[in-house]
Image (tube, grey):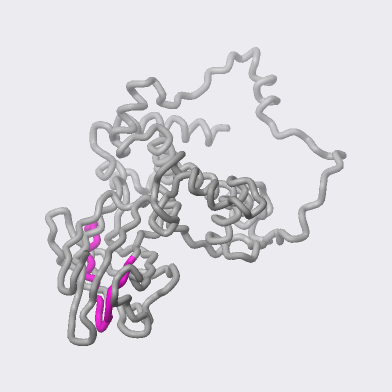
Amino acid sequence: MIERLEYINALAAAIPEIITAGWPTWATAHAGDPFFTMIEERLLCLRDRYGQSDLETLCAYLVAEDLVPAPQSVPSAMFWPYKRSATFADSRGVIKKRVPASIVKSTSGALNGAPGSWRWGAWEIFKKAIECLRKQPPTGGAATKDQGPMGRDKWFAEAAGSGLFWLCYFMRYTLNFMYGPGAPNKWPFTFQMPPWCVTSHKRWRLNAYGYYGYAGLNLVWYPPAGMNYGSGISLYIKVSPDTSKLNPGDMNVGLIYSEHASMNDDGEVEGDYGSATLAPLPAAWIQWPIACVRYDGDNNLYQYLDFQEMDGAYIIDVFVSSNFSVNEPGSVYVEKFGGTWY
């Protein structure tokens, strides 16, 4: 209880300081504090819950709405009833169902919620599926799942004939993409982000000119407040032939080459470049790590994507791998070269 009180006091003290100094300055000064990670995670959750644009705005909102956490004052006469009410119930002698045999309990975590325990894994699955559901608008949204969050009316129509209620269909489809069609049974799980769970999806259409042609994209990825892309990002990317054109792209030729480096807020690249090659062209979603050495605290990431030896018309889908809204890009700068972009 003492540790919990110290955390609440630290969080309450941090909020006015963040308003005054700004999150980056405060985070740099307090990165070594014992409760820094807990405070950062709590503020990020509150930012999304209250729909604020950044952590400074969130802290001002908490102060204005009298939502800054404060220690509880319990009268001494009520201390022991209060403590008993806050104590876990004693379940000795209570008959319970066995842990399902299909869930392997890892030996790395024996306590409730400890990383590695089966309960932690079940909570992770449930939380991710619910967060993805919240991103689906009631109607409208993207035309298809591959382009971003899709209206729930479209999910309802797609579920017709499956024998499942649309919500059950959505959950099953989403979890099969996240964790694979085989149910995972040991935490931590291998995870991939579905395109309909992110709002930062980018789609480009390119008519490439074969072996002697060239095409490229100048990109600058700007991180959200309080985070950085200076050490790189992880992209999800998929390429498909554009069958609406007379010359759909040939998926058996070509590759994608990336050069990338950290960039400061003045648009300058002073650090070393990293590189990565993607071949053959990915016909299904694939995760592509983009890594470089962060230079002098630069937060942004510059990237030049070079589409080499591709022939025909292609649809190129890209989004940044994220933990839902926690680290989706703040914005993206795009400049196109070569080929025909349409």
At a point 27% along the width and 81% down the height, the residue shown is 311
Q: Nearer the viewer, residue 133 or 251?
A: 251
Residue 299 in view (yes/no) = no
In percent of width and height, residue 26 lies at 29, 41
In this picture, residue 183 sits left or right of residue 328: right
The residue shown at (44%, 49%) is 150
Q: Image quadrant for the C terminus?
A: bottom left
In the displayed structure image, the side of residue 142 where residue 171 appears, left or right: right
Q: Say which quadrant the N terminus sits in.
A: top right
Q: Which residue lies furthest to the bottom in this view?
A: 211
Taking the magenta stretch, the answer to whether it contains residue 241 is no
Residue 131, x across and y down, in percent: 50, 45
Q: Is 72 displayed left or right of 111 in the figure? A: left
Q: Residue at x 15, y 66 (%)?
A: 270
Q: In this view, does 269 lie to the left or right of 149?
A: left
Is any atom of residue 302 visible in this view?
yes
Q: From which residue to which does the magenta span run?
A: 297-316
**Where 26 falls versus 62 (above or below)?**
below
Q: Find residue 7 and report its horizontal and vertical position in percent.
A: 47, 35
Instruction: Say which of 180 and 140 sits in front.
Output: 140
Q: Looking at the picture, how far across and down is residue 280, in whole percent?
A: 38, 81
Q: In this view, does 206 lie above or below 188?
A: below
Q: In which quarter of the image is residue 294?
A: bottom left
Decide which of 318, 262 is in the foreground and name it. 318
Q: Is residue 185 above or below residue 151?
A: below
Q: In which quarter of the image is residue 116?
A: bottom right
| Prevailing secondary structure class for the magenta stretch in the rendered image | strand
The residue lying furthest to the front in this view is 246
